[in-house]
Amino acid sequence: MSDNLARVSFAVDEAEFETPAPAHRGFRLVSSAPNHRARPRIFYAFTAVAGVAAIIVAQLLLSVGISQGAYEISSLQSSQAELGRTAASVNEDLVRVSSPQSLAANAEGLGMVSNSNPVYLRLSDGAVLGAPASASGSQAGAASLVPNALLAGSEPLTQAPAAAKASAGAVAITSAPVVPAGLAAPTTR
Amino acid sequence: MSVRTSSARKNSTASRSSRRRTVSTILVLFVVVSVFLVRLVDIQVVQADSLTADSVGNRSVGQVVYGSRGEILDANGVVLASTVMRYNITMSPVNATPFTRTVDGKKVEISVADAAAEIGAATGQTGDAILLTISTALEANAKANFAYIAQKVDVDVLRAVQDLHIPWTYSENSPSRVYPNGAVAGNILGYLSGEGVPQAGLESGQDACLASTNGSETYEKGADGVRIPGSSVTGSEAVDGGDVITTIDSDLNWFVQQTLAARAQETGAAWATAVVQDAKTGKLLAVADYPSVDPNNVGGTENPEDRGSRAFTQSFEPGSTLKALTAASVLDAGVATLDTGVVAPYRYLPANGANINDSHAHADQRMTLTGVLIDSSNTGMSKFGEMLTNQKRYDYLKAFGVGTATESGFPREDSGILHPVEEWDNQTSYATMFGQGLTTTALQVSSIYQTIANDGVRMPVQLVEGCRQADGTITNVPETTGTRVLSEKAANETSDVLEMVYQNSWVSSIWEIPGYRVAAKTGTAQMPDGKGGYSSGYLVSVSGFAPADDPQYVVSVSIADPVKLNTSAAPAPVFQEIMSQVLKKYRAVPSGATAPDLPSTW
């Protein structure tokens, strides 16, 4: 195998050496002016001018488009800023009415009292953990002693809004008479 | 010949004049060109930079991009302090002239007085006040181009003013700080000055986390005021501050403040503090001060001392609440047991020359440690305390954190006073057993009870969970490794003794929480008069923890100089209400296990 390869490569080398060098060709004079000059045709001129015109028009349209976009962006940005301000302002209101002072005042305004005596019912064995007692409403009626300047001017609720009342009433009506007569009361063990 | 000559002369004259003309033309041209050239080089090379800058300056608008100061949050993410954008309404007094406005298609001339009245209606001022602002500004400077109409108004006012379309009014952004929960934890949060410089509390102590960096931006705008696209150049990026997450529960803090303030007002107290601490972790769940400050309206709290947090910065002689520490030390050192008895006289004159007496006259009593704490007997406590050397007791006091500011990191926190043992005189050696002759803050007292409640391991007092960066990582997380101060046995025995105190103290009907096992101790300490002696006022306090069989919460209430009720009956109901609320809020279910019954006499 390797023998064969060596022979072939030798033969190629030989062939290259045997090829005669090509003879040099003499230089030849070329007339300085071409025999007939290609006359510029109106077509090319027209094409060039049209091309330039097209580029100018395209560029003009593009810049009109961009500046139109700039106006659009500007107006959208300002409306975004305005909406951002609205969102921030509404969020501020929400956080303010979520403050403990506001919640407590409203809960008390609606007649709720806090029971500071927790009692737990353990479901596994029904054991009552803690000593049950009725709510004394220790906090009720006390003016807020933890001021919040942000709540100035907002009045706590003294009754549920009309809409909430109406829906509560509707729920009561629909849910009242559903228990069929004669059904045994469930026995809880 | 003569003709030729004259003609030749004429020719030569003509050619000479023509050459002169050419030369002069060239010269003139050269001069003109060189003038242009010089000007060109001057404009394009010499002055190029400044002219470019000028042109950009004429077209471009620079503005501050405000970085937002970080929020302060409570443990549940409720915002306690946040940054909101407010607006300053400004005007150009020199341009304050009548203008025309189109109303329903008709042009109406609006006078300055009318415009001022309209602005006033929007900003809540009188028109005259605004006219006065204009005239004052013009008096000071006839060409005054800037004056404030109103500062830090909200967006509703800003829009009302903008809708008036008065050509000489403008607005600018002015970031402000709001505290949505008002005075809830206000004493801890602190506040900023009008210029936004932190003044107190966490705003000051955590400023490194909260502070933001303002950036700048310039853009070019056309004659119609529209921003030229692609012309924005950001000078420097605005960097928002991080959020400080505290361990405080804002709802609980409100309840504690409300309850404390009600009792403090009822008893005519000078000031009061209440601390709720997690017994297992040392985290502060609520820190209440009376009087409290609303950081939204700092000026509404007149006394500057009421604007800080006394729970951190005011130390006082704790009185009998410290007897729990002495009892724990004695039990831990093993020099006495729960069965050890002493004879407690009304007056005890130890060998070193001190003079100890109880608060009320009584015959000699044969008491155990339990009995001494139930009756809060100074003489009995002295007899137990002297079983330990002064140095040993000093070491225990130090280990409990007395005399060292806590780990809370609150600015200007008081360390309290614990003199080196060499400086204790005869009386101080005994007084330190029952909480006089040394001072502690409310926080340090709470920490002492936390140590006893947590099986003898003192946890670092923690107010801040850490600083939450923009990418959500929490940095500056405080150390939370506890140190053992007492053996578990000594801590539990002390807890049992304190539970006996809770059941049998003279205020036990006041502080009873039905269904729960509670350990607590009262304190009634004389207050210094500031002249080296004691005033007639008392600092009354209650500290304790619950549920006693598996302590989870420590509550410490201190009321200073309640003139209408100067006994521990003043803080006891506050302790009861706060502890009930804590147990209810965190669903600490009573175990139903029976309380220990230890002998109090022998």
Image: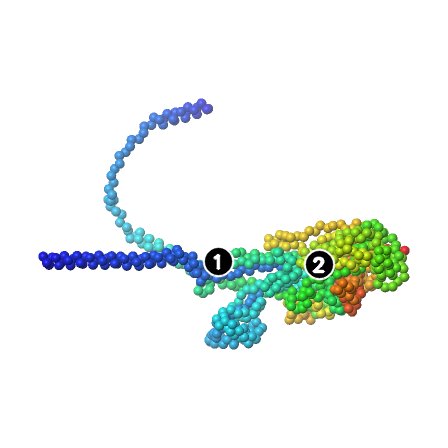
Q: Chain of mark 2?
A: B
Look at the image and tell me whether residue B121 can be seen: no
Q: Residue B590 at x, y = what percent?
A: 79, 57
User: Which numbered tag is attached to residue B132?
Assistant: none
Which residue in the protein does label 1 denote? B232
Of helix, strand and loop, which one carries label 1?
loop
Q: Residue B477 at x, y = what percent?
A: 66, 52
The foreground one among B199 and B420 is: B420
Residue B157 in the image: above or below residue A59: below
Which residue in the protein does label 2 denote? B414
Which label sits in the foreground, 1 or 2?
2
Give the residue type at disc 1. Answer: Ser
Relative placement, left or right, of B346 versus A184 is right
Relative placement, left or right, of A15 versus B92 is left
Relative placement, left or right, of A75 versus B249 is left
Estimate how packed mark 1 is, as few (under 14), some (14 to 19) or many (20 or more) residues with alpha carbons within 10 Å.
some
The foreground one among A145 and A56 is: A145
Q: Residue A65 at x, y = what percent?
A: 43, 59
The foreground one among B33 and A67 is: B33
- Identify which residue is drawn at 24% across, 39% down: A29
- Which badge, 1 or 2, is on the more N-terminal residue? 1
- Identify which residue is drawn at 33% across, 58% down: B36
Give the residue type at disc 2. Answer: Asp
Of helix, strand and loop, which one carries label 2?
loop
